[in-house]
Image: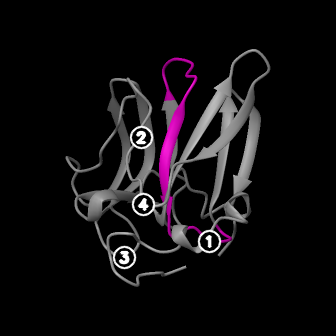
Amino acid sequence: MSQRKSRYILFSLICGLLLSISVLKADSSIVVTYEAPGVQSSTVVASHVFSFDDLENGTINDYFWTYGAFSGLTINDSNVFGGAGGSGKYLSSTDAFVSGLYLYSPVSYFGFWWSSGNNYNVVDFYNDTNLICSFDTSVLGGLSADYNGNPNLSGANPT
């Protein structure tokens, strides 16, 4: 499986980890922070949260919502690989799709729950066509074992 084919911009994967990305507009830098282990929703005041729960399972080529557009979605019911809160649905990518999120306006905060991360998962952030930052699960190195596995399933760790 090629790394390009399995690029992810995932909102619900399984490390039980919520990443907060702060994009500082002046120099287009990105600051990565982590919520406490087990936190599965943003603690940022006035943030807008997108849930995949209202979408049908399966592949969705394009989906438009208030703040942006998604492309290349595969929607699944919660399981050992994803589903914040232990229920609902989550986004995943397959070999056939590169998932994307295109925001209509600049943002100063972007967060997502990245679970079931592995060496094939890559998240790229762009400002128009300019790549600002690209990272994979190595950014998670050094985190405690409290971040491993799905916090909603006892002993679940598919990575």
**Which residue occupies the foreground of this view, 61 or 40?**
40
Give the residue number, with chain letter if any, for mark 1: 118
Give the mark nearer the N terminus: 1 vs 3: 3
Mark 4 residue crowding within 10 angstroms, few (<14) / some (14–19) / many (20+): some
- Amino acid carrying label 3: it is Val
Disc marking residue 38: 4
Gap in angstroms between the C-alphas marked 1 and 3: 14 Å
Tag 3, which secondary structure?
Answer: loop
- Amino acid carrying label 1: it is Asn
Disc marking residue 80: 3
Give the residue number, with chain letter if any, for mark 2: 42
Direction from residue 108 to residue 68 in the image, left or right: left
Give the mark nearer the N terminus: 1 vs 4: 4
Gap in angstroms between the C-alphas marked 2 and 3: 21 Å
- The residue shown at (40%, 28%) is 47
Disc number lying in front (3 or 4): 4
Disc number lying in front (4 or 2): 4
Q: Is residue 130 above or below residue 104?
A: below
The answer to whether residue 111 is magenta is yes
Task: Report the span colored magenta.
Answer: 103-120
Quadrant containing the C terminus is bottom right
- The residue shown at (69%, 18%) is 25
Give the mark nearer the N terminus: 2 vs 1: 2
